[in-house]
Image (tube, grey):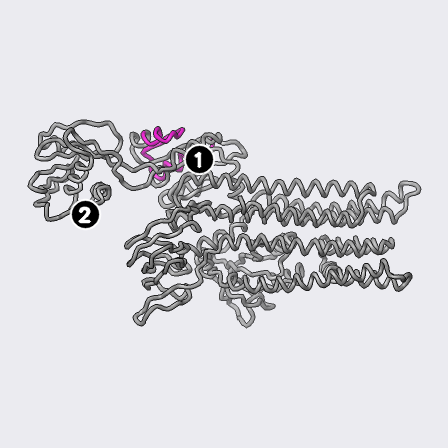
C-alpha cells in the first residue's frame, strides 16, 4: 500500500436492497487501484479507499461500475451532497480531488467532513420523498389490481383478455422487467429482478396468466412493505441518536445571537437556556444548573454543574441558564464524534454478516441451477410428466431463491444493537466487536480509573478519644490549607467548608514529612509516621492500605485520616456479575503489590498482577491470551490513555471514556462514556440480545425458504404462496430486528 491514500464517501440515494449493497461492495472492491470498499446499507453510503495518484483512472471506473451494477443509483459526495460526474468527482470539479488526504490525516479530515449536514438536511426531504413514493406505489398497485380483476371477471376472452393481463403485468412490474433487461445486458443475472422476471414470464408461457400478474403484484406489495420496514428502522435509530444540536446562542458585544454550531470558534462564549441542548464542549464560566446526560451516558439522574465544571455537547440543560466558554470546535465536539462512530459502526461487519453475504452469493446461483434442472430433467426421465408442470415448479424455486430476508435483516439487527448500546452510553465501533462480546471468557482490567475513581479521597477518619471525626477533619483541613499536594486537596475537599484563613498564624512544610501549622493559637502537626517520630509523639500504627495522615494537636496525638484511591460504587457488583457468568477476571496495575492485592481482595477479582510497567501489562495480557480456546475472547478494560498498547493487543479493547476522552475514543473498540464498570455487563447483554434476534431471523428465513422449496418441488405450493412467503419473511425479519431498540 502506498503511504498516501484517499478515503472517499459517496451517498447512494436509491440503495434500497441489501443484496444490491453487497453486490456493489464486492464489485467495486475488484477494481484495480481500490484498496478497500465498504457499503453501509443502513446509511446508504459507499466508502472506498484508493491509491494515491490513480484517481484519474479509478474514480471514473468506480462511477462506471456503479452505473452497471445499479443503474438507478445517482451517487453524491457525502460531505457536500454534490452530484458525482463521469470523472468520479463532484460535478464541476477538476483533478486533483478536493477530497484528497493522506492515510494518517484521513480519519481527522473524515471527521471534519462528517458534520452530518448532509444527513441532517436529508431527513426532512427524504421523508417527503418517501411519502410521495409510497403514494405513487399504492396508486400503481391499485391500478394493477383493478386491471387484473377486469381481466379475470370481465365478459371477455381471447386476445382482449390476454391484452388486459399483459397490461396489468406491465403496470405492476414494468420497472422489474426493465431492470432485468439492463442487468442481463451488463452480465448481472442473479438478482431479484431477473429471478422475478423469469418466474413470471414462465407463468405466462404455461398460460397461468392470473398467477403471473398476481405474483408480480404481490412481490411489489412485499417490496413496498419491506422498504417501509427498513425505513422505519432507519428512522428509529436516527431518532434514538437525535442528539445533534440545531443552534447555539453566541454572546457578543452587541447581544446574544442564534447561530449555527459550526460557526462557533474556540474561546467564544455561548449561552444555554433551560431546556436547550449544550451545542459544543466547554467549561461553565457563569451560572449553575442541572444537566440531563442520558443521551451520552445513559444515566437518568441529572448532574449538577457550576462554574469551572466541564460540559459536553449533547447534554440537555434542565433548569438554570449557564454561560460556557467553548473549548472545541463543533467538528471535534463529543456529539459529532459519537454520531460518527455510531453511524459508521456497521461498516465493520460481524462474522455472521460476512458469512451470510458469502452464503447468498452462492445460494442464489445454486437455486437457479436447481430450478433449471427441475424444469428440464423430470420431463425427460420420468414417463408421462409434462414440461409445463415442472416449469411451474421451477418458477417457484426462482421466487424463493431471492436472499433478501437474510441480507436485509442482519445489518438492520446489528445496526439496531449498536444504536441500543449507544442509548445506554456505550459506543461500539463495529458489528464485529458487538458480536465478539458474546464470546468473552477473560476480562482483564486496569485498576486506576477503571475499577477505582482515579483520584485521592478520604476513605476513613479515626479520631482519638475526646475528639470527633468532624473535628479531626476540620483540624486537618486548616493544617493543609496552603498545600497544593493531591492529598491535601482531598482533605480540603472532604471538609467542604470555607476555611477562615485569618485563623492560621503560620505554616511550615517539613520536606518528606508533612506540615507544622499554627491555627487558632494551637500547634498542628499533620503528616506521616516520620513526622510523629521527629517530634516524639506516640501514635497508633495501622495496616490499612493507603496514605495515612497522622495528626497531633499541641504535641498530643489526635488521630489519623486514611487517603486512598476509592473503589467505584459499581465495581464490586460488576465483578460479581462477571464471575456469575463464568468469566475469569484479572487486574493489572502499576501500583504496589500491597495496594493491588488489597483492592483485588475487596472487589473479589480472581487474579492480581501489580507493579507493572506498560510493557509488562502487554506481556501479562499475552500470557492470558495464550490460555484461551479457539472461539474465546479476551477483553482488556482500561482508561484509554496509558493503556493504549494493551487495548490494541486484546481481542476487544474497552475504554472508560472519561466523558469524551479523545485518547479513549481513538484507542478502543468499545467506549463506556460514563466510566461505569457495570456497563461491561450491559454491553454483553445488548450483544446477546442482538445475536439472538439475528439468529432468529437466519433460522426463520432459511426454514421458510427450505419448506417452500420442498413444497414447490412436490407441486404443493403455488407461485403466489411462494412470493407471499418470500416477501412476508423479509418484512417479519426486519420488524423483528427493530425489536432490539425496544429492549
Provide the residue designation for mark 1.
443
Position of 131 relative to 628 (above/below): below
**CA neighbours of label 1 inside 10 A, class few (<14), some (14 to 19), many (20+):** many
Tell me the chief SS of the magenta region: helix
On the image, the x and y values in percent for residue 256 come to 34, 68
Q: In the rendered structure, which segment of residues is drawn in magenta?
A: 598-627
Residue extending farthest left: 521
Q: Secondary structure at mark 1?
A: strand
**Residue 586 occupies quadrant:** top left
Query: How far apart in space, not on screen, are marks 1 and 2 (Cα)?
Result: 44 Å
Q: Secondary structure at mark 2?
A: loop
On the image, the x and y values in percent for residue 245 come to 43, 60
Horizontal side, residue 158 vs residue 328: left or right:
right
Q: Earlier in the sequence, mark 1 or mark 2?
A: 1
Q: Is residue 446 within the magenta segment?
A: no
Q: Which mark is residue 498?
A: 2
Residue extending farthest front: 319
Q: Is disc 1 in contact with disc 2, using a CB cutoff of under 8 Å?
A: no
Q: Nearer the viewer, mark 1 or mark 2?
A: 2
Position of 707 relative to 124 (above/below): above
On the image, the x and y values in percent for residue 537 come to 10, 30
Q: Is residue 623 within the magenta segment?
A: yes
**Residue 579 occupies quadrant:** top left
Horizontal side, residue 551 vs residue 423: left or right:
left
Amino acid at each position: 500500500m502506498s503511504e498516501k491514500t484517499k478515503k472517499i464517501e459517496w451517498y447512494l440515494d436509491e440503495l434500497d436492497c441489501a443484496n444490491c449493497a453487497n453486490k456493489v461492495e464486492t464489485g467495486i472492491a475488484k477494481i484495480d487501484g481500490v484498496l478497500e470498499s465498504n457499503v453501509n446499507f443502513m446509511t446508504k453510503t459507499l466508502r472506498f479507499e484508493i491509491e494515491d495518484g490513480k484517481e484519474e483512472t479509478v474514480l471514473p471506473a468506480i462511477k462506471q461500475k456503479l452505473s452497471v451494477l445499479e443503474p438507478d443509483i445517482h451517487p453524491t459526495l457525502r460531505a457536500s451532497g454534490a452530484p458525482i460526474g463521469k470523472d468520479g468527482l463532484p460535478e464541476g470539479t477538476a483533478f486533483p480531488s478536493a477530497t484528497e488526504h493522506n492515510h494518517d490525516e484521513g480519519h481527522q479530515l473524515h471527521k471534519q467532513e462528517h458534520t452530518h449536514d448532509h444527513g441532517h438536511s436529508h431527513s426532512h426531504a427524504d421523508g417527503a420523498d418517501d411519502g410521495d413514493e409510497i403514494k405513487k406505489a399504492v396508486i400503481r398497485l391499485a391500478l394493477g389490481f383493478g386491471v387484473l380483476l377486469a381481466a379475470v371477471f370481465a365478459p371477455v376472452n381471447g386476445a382482449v383478455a390476454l391484452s388486459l393481463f399483459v397490461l396489468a403485468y406491465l403496470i405492476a412490474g414494468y420497472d422489474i422487467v426493465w431492470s432485468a433487461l439492463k442487468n442481463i445486458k451488463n452480465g448481472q443475472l442473479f438478482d431479484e429482478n431477473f429471478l422475478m422476471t423469469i418466474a413470471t414470464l414462465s407463468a405466462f408461457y404455461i398460460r397461468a396468466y392470473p398467477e403471473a400478474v398476481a405474483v408480480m403484484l404481490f412481490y411489489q406489495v412485499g417490496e413496498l412493505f419491506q422498504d417501509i420496514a427498513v425505513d422505519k428502522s432507519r428512522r428509529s435509530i436516527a431518532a434514538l441518536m437525535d442528539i445533534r444540536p440545531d443552534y447555539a446562542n453566541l454572546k457578543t458585544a452587541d447581544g446574544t445571537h442564534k447561530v449555527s454550531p459550526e460557526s462557533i470558534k474556540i474561546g467564544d462564549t455561548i449561552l444555554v437556556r433551560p431546556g436547550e441542548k449544550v451545542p459544543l464542549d466547554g467549561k461553565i464560566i457563569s451560572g449553575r444548573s442541572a444537566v440531563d446526560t442520558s443521551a451520552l451516558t445513559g444515566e437518568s439522574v441529572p448532574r449538577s454543574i457550576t462554574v469551572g465544571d466541564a460540559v459536553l455537547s449533547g447534554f440537555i440543560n434542565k433548569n438554570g441558564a449557564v454561560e460556557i466558554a467553548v473549548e472545541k470546535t463543533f467538528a471535534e465536539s463529543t456529539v459529532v464524534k459519537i454520531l460518527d462512530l455510531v453511524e459508521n459502526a456497521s461498516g465493520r461487519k460481524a462474522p455472521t454478516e460476512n458469512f451470510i453475504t458469502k452464503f447468498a452469493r452462492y445460494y442464489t446461483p445454486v437455486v437457479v441451477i436447481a430450478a433449471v434442472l427441475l424444469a428440464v430433467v423430470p420431463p425427460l426421465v420420468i414417463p408421462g410428466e409434462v414440461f409445463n408442470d415442472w416449469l411451474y415448479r421451477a418458477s417457484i424455486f426462482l421466487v424463493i431463491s431471492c436472499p433478501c430476508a437474510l441480507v436485509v435483516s442482519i445489518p438492520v439487527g446489528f445496526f439496531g444493537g449498536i444504536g441500543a448500546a449507544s442509548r445506554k452510553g456505550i459506543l461500539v465501533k463495529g458489528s464485529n466487536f458487538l458480536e465478539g462480546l458474546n464470546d468473552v471468557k477473560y476480562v482483564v482490567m486496569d485498576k486506576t480509573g477503571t475499577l477505582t475513581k482515579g483520584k485521592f479521597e478520604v476513605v476513613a477518619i479515626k479520631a482519638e478519644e475526646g475528639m470527633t471525626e468532624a473535628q479531626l477533619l476540620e483540624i486537618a483541613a486548616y493544617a493543609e490549607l496552603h498545600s497544593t499536594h493531591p492529598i491535601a486537596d482531598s482533605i480540603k475537599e472532604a471538609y467542604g467548608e470555607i476555611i477562615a484563613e485569618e485563623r492560621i498564624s503560620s505554616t511550615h512544610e517539613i520536606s518528606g514529612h508533612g506540615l507544622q501549622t499554627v491555627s487558632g493559637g494551637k500547634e498542628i502537626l499533620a503528616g506521616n509516621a516520620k513526622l510523629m517520630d521527629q517530634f516524639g509523639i506516640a501514635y497508633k500504627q495501622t495496616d490499612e492500605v493507603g496514605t495515612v495522615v497522622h495528626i497531633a494537636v499541641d504535641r498530643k496525638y489526635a488521630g489519623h485520616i486514611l487517603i486512598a484511591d476509592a473503589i467505584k460504587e459499581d465495581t464490586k457488583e460488576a465483578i460479581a456479575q462477571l464471575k456469575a457468568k463464568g468469566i475469569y477476571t484479572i487486574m493489572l496495575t502499576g501500583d504496589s503489590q500491597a495496594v493491588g492485592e488489597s483492592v483485588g481482595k475487596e472487589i473479589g477479582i480472581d487474579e492480581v498482577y501489580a507493579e507493572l510497567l506498560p510493557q509488562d501489562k502487554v506481556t501479562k495480557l499475552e500470557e492470558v491470551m495464550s490460555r484461551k480456546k479457539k472461539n474465546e475472547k479476551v477483553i482488556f478494560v482500561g482508561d484509554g490513555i496509558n493503556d493504549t498498547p494493551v487495548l490494541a493487543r486484546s481481542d476487544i479493547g474497552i475504554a472508560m471514556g472519561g466523558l469524551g476522552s479523545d485518547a479513549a475514543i481513538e484507542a478502543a473498540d468499545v467506549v463506556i462514556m460514563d466510566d461505569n464498570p457495570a456497563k461491561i455487563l450491559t454491553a454483553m447483554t445488548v450483544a446477546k440480545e442482538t445475536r439472538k434476534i439475528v439468529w432468529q431471523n437466519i433460522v426463520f428465513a432459511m426454514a421458510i425458504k427450505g419448506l417452500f422449496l420442498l413444497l414447490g418441488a412436490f407441486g404443493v405450493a403455488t407461485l403466489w404462496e411462494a412470493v407471499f412467503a418470500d416477501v412476508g419473511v423479509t418484512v417479519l425479519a426486519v420488524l423483528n430486528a427493530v425489536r432490539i431498540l425496544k429492549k
